[in-house]
Image (cartoon, coloured by chain):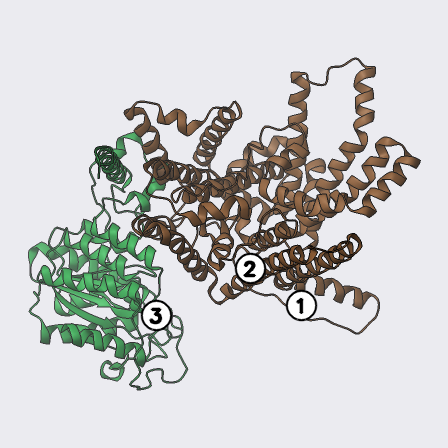
Chain colours: A green, B brown
């Protein structure tokens, strides 16, 4: 490269650095300064962990709508005293799960991550996944791509304000439903040796998620909650193979349904796709038994610092009608 | 893969540019050809076969035409004049047969895929009306990407060889690259082989100038598309989707904003693709020349979608207007109806065919036919009334170039263009007529202020659109005055240049209509 070439190269690199700096600055200014809906945050329920006391959450549950419908942190608390938060979003991709994990880790000292595996089979465009992974890896540095429209509602003062998270989610990320619309179809978990394939757009960020857990000394558990419409034995085999290869335990409640008294006629809100609050209670208690046997988590029920959790349980219990 | 997607801008374009830069010069065309077919296959899958068929058809037709010309030149030697004449007739007949068969084949594919359902529908309705019990199946085929664009390019290639404009290429890769080049396959511009084939094929080394200018133009195109067009789409979709609930004044605003949307989007796309091609040192034909600055409808059309207009002029209008029948009709009419009307008739006939072509090129439907005829009728009216208008001006001793008059002309032409665009955007001709009726019978100017902010765009959206459109207008104005914007910016100090470039990119990032709350908007002209 000649002198002119070097000069041009340095100039291009400097300009790119300037762009990165501007993007980071815009991201800081436009990022929501609170995790309430009014604060402009996307999916406030999934981001409620920001306003939980620092290092108070031991278990993070990641996944899509199956996870926020079928796992109940309050039941887990009431029965076992474990503190958990469901940071799940509708159609959450694995790259987004990874991004959420990074965010939770920045505030809480996690001991266990429960990853709901349904989202592994949702195909997304590789390029979009790559963009999400870049964004997730850089934390919130490029959140302007997600929150750019907040220029409409953000005042000049708020642009430079430090974040202050105030939202309170009594269900700890669970989406409660008291609807009962039973599933009356046949058995969907028909045993087979066939194996579905996990798309590369899911596998790449999953590898990153596994690595992040390992590097931070966090146990990882794969979980599949009952879902008649989105799950089958081929997918089970695919996750089992990946889990075995990476030494990750895998709890598939679609196979173990009889062991915790699951009933498709009463425990689903939409004919077999998602669980209702009764189904979530049954599933969570079963998972709790599994956690007691396999992990050394802390029962915080007698800890004075966790009084709020008892109040939250009372509020939760009032909302559960079935 | 949209031209505004991460996949295209960050991954596809970046990867192709790196490969193109590092491979030796003689293989650079192969990188572009591979990239073009990958791009096409990613978008159209199995339908890529239609592109291949069109390419093969015109490639072999070109070679055949060349062979016929070559053998006829050899055979002519030593022949008598009469025999030469006979041979020429035979050769012309053979060449015509090759061209007609090839055009029949490539346009046959286009007609079958794009228009067969429409024409079958018309036939079935006519059959039902006549009481016949004969029904044709109304197929709806998946459209291969850019079929309306590459078919015209392919046809132009064969016709030009037939006319002797240039010789056929014996390099299949060169023809294939000319027809499939990824920046222009989706929305044009419709290229000519003699302009495009060599720059595509010869291979260019790394050029910092091409890289920076290509990226600048791409960013400017993204600004037009994402900041202006996609934001305006919020209003346009709402009003056109629920037109029955809005007053004439809101419908007029929607028509005007749709005109802005389609211009910002189409010209923005042209900037993106021209910028993309510039990265590889390939200059694409100009498709827009500031159509805002026009007094007459015909001028507007000359500056709008220039390559389509030029294609139809060269391959439809001229052949029709210069055909023996047209010339004979013109002579006949001039002798009986006078000079003005006599020369008007053959032109009007050739233009009718051209405008029907423009209408149907945009889509298979009565709406598109009417769209073409709308402009045709207005232009014909202008041509017919011209002598009367000229006489009127001279009788009143008025200047035809006054400022006020020009302003009125711009206003009139804008109104006519907006009327045409409303038809283009409306679901059907009857919806368009209903909307036009509301412009006159329930305009409700008083209620405009109370409604305009409830149609999908809020105050801030309008503010951004106003700023963006003003920037676009100022740039156009400067270009109209002959100022080359990119060159002018390049002459500024580094801080000024960087502020301009970074400002443009950050404006797209912050004010672009994308992500949560916005539906991805496909390029309108990408659907043809």
Q: Work out which residue is located at the far top of the displayed protein and give it.
A: B397
Percent x, y of residue B123: 75, 65
* Chain for disc number 2: B
Considering the image in quadrants, where does the N terminus of chain A appear? top left
Mark nearer the viewer, 3 or 2: 2
Disc number for residue A193: none
Between disc 1 and disc 2, whose residue precedes? 2
Mark nearer the viewer, 1 or 2: 2
**Residue B306 vertical placement versus A69 (above, below):** above
Considering the image in quadrants, where does the C terminus of chain A appear? bottom left
Q: Work out which residue is located at the far right of the displayed protein and give it.
A: B336
Are circles 1 and 2 on residues that touch, CB within 8 Å? no
Pick the front one: A229 or A85: A229
Residue identifier under label 1: B138
Is disc 1 placed on a helix, strand or loop? loop
Badge 3 and badge 2 both on one subunit: no
Using the rendered image of the protein, determine whether residue B190 is visible from the camera's viewpoint: no
Disc number for residue B59: 2
Q: Is residue B402 left or right of residue B491?
A: right
Disc 1/disc 3 C-alpha distance (Å): 41 Å
Disc 1/disc 2 C-alpha distance (Å): 32 Å
Percent x, y of residue B355: 70, 45
Is disc 2 placed on a helix, strand or loop? helix
Q: Is residue B395 left or right of residue A107?
A: right
Disc number for residue A274: 3
């Amino acid at each position: 490269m000649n002198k002119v070439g070097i000069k041009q190269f340095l100039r291009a690199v400097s300009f790119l650095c300037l762009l990165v700096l501007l993007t980071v600055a815009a991201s800081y200014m436009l990022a929501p300064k609170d995790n309430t809906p009014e604060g402009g945050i996307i999916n406030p329920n999934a981001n409620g962990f920001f306003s939980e006391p620092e290092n108070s959450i031991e278990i993070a549950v990641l996944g899509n709508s199956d996870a926020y419908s079928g796992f109940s942190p309050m039941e887990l608390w009431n029965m076992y005293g474990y503190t958990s938060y469901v940071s799940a979003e509708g159609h959450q991709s694995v790259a987004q799960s990874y991004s959420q994990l990074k965010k939770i880790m920045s505030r809480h000292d996690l001991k266990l991550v429960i990853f709901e595996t349904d989202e592994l089979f949702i195909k997304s465009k590789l390029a979009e996944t790559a963009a999400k992974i870049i964004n997730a890896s850089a934390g919130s540095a490029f959140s302007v791509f997600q929150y750019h429209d907040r220029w409409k509602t953000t005042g000049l003062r708020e642009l430079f304000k430090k974040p202050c998270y105030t939202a309170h989610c009594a269900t700890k990320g669970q989406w409660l439903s008291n609807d009962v619309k039973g599933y009356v179809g046949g058995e969907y978990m028909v045993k087979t040796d066939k194996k579905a394939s996990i798309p590369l757009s899911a596998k790449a960020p999953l590898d990153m998620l596994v690595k992040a857990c390992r590097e931070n000394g966090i146990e990882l558990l794969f979980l599949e909650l009952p879902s008649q419409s989105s799950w089958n034995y081929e997918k089970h085999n695919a996750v089992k193979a990946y889990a075995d290869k990476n030494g990750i335990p895998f709890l598939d409640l679609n196979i173990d349904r009889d062991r915790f008294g699951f009933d498709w006629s009463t425990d689903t809100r939409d004919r077999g796709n998602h669980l209702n609050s009764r189904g979530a209670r049954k599933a969570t208690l079963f998972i709790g038994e599994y956690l007691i046997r396999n992990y050394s988590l802390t029962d915080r029920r007698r800890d004075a610092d966790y009084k709020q959790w008892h109040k939250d349980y009372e509020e939760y219990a009032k909302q559960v009608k079935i | 893969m949209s031209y505004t997607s991460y996949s295209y801008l960050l991954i596809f374009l970046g990867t192709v540019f790196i490969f193109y830069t590092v491979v030796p010069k003689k293989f650079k065309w192969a990188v572009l050809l591979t990239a073009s077919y990958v791009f096409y296959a990613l978008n159209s899958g199995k339908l890529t076969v239609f592109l291949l068929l069109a390419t093969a058809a015109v490639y072999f037709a070109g070679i055949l035409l060349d062979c016929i010309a070559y053998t006829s030149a050899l055979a002519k030697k030593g022949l008598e004049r009469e025999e030469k004449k006979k041979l020429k007739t035979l050769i012309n007949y053979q060449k015509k047969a090759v061209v007609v068969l090839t055009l029949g084949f490539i346009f046959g594919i286009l007609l079958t895929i794009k228009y067969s359902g429409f024409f079958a529908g018309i036939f079935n309705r006519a059959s039902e009306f006549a009481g016949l019990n004969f029904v044709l199946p109304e197929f709806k085929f998946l459209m291969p990407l850019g079929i309306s664009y590459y078919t015209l390019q392919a046809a132009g290639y064969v016709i030009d060889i037939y006319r002797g404009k240039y010789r056929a290429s014996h390099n299949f890769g060169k023809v294939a690259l000319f027809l499939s080049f990824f920046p222009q396959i989706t929305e044009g511009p419709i290229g000519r082989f003699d302009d495009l084939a060599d720059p595509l094929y010869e291979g260019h080394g790394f050029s910092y100038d091409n890289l920076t200018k290509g990226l600048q133009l791409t960013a400017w195109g993204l600004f037009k598309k994402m900041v202006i067009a996609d934001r305006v789409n919020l209003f346009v979709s709402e009003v056109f989707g629920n037109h029955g609930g809005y007053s004439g004044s809101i419908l007029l605003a929607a028509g005007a904003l749709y005109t802005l949307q389609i211009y910002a989007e189409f010209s923005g796309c042209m900037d993106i693709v021209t910028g993309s091609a510039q990265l590889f040192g390939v200059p694409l034909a100009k498709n827009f020349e500031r159509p805002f600055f026009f007094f007459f409808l015909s001028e507007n059309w000359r500056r709008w979608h220039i390559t389509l207009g030029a294609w139809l002029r060269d391959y439809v209008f001229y052949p029709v207007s210069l055909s023996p029948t047209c010339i004979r009709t013109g002579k006949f009419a001039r002798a009986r109806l006078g000079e003005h009307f006599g020369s008007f008739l053959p032109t009007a006939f050739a233009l009718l065919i051209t405008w029907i072509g423009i209408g149907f090129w945009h889509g298979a439907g009565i709406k598109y036919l009417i769209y073409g005829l709308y402009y045709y009728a207005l232009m014909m009216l202008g041509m017919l009334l011209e002598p009367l208008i000229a006489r009127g001006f001279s009788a009143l001793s008025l200047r035809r170039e006054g400022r006020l008059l020009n302003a009125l002309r711009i206003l009139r032409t804008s109104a006519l263009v907006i009327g045409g665009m409303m038809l283009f955007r409306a679901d059907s001709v009857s919806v368009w007529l209903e909307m036009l009726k509301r412009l006159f019978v329930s305009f409700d100017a008083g209620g405009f202020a109370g409604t305009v902010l409830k149609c999908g765009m809020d105050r801030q959206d309008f503010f951004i659109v106003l700023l963006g459109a003003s920037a676009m207008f100022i740039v156009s104005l400067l270009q109209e005055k002959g100022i080359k914007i990119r060159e002018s910016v390049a002459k500024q100090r580094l801080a000024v240049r960087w502020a301009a470039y970074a400002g443009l990119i950050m404006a797209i990032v912050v004010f672009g209509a994308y992500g949560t709350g916005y539906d991805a908007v496909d390029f309108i002209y990408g659907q043809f």
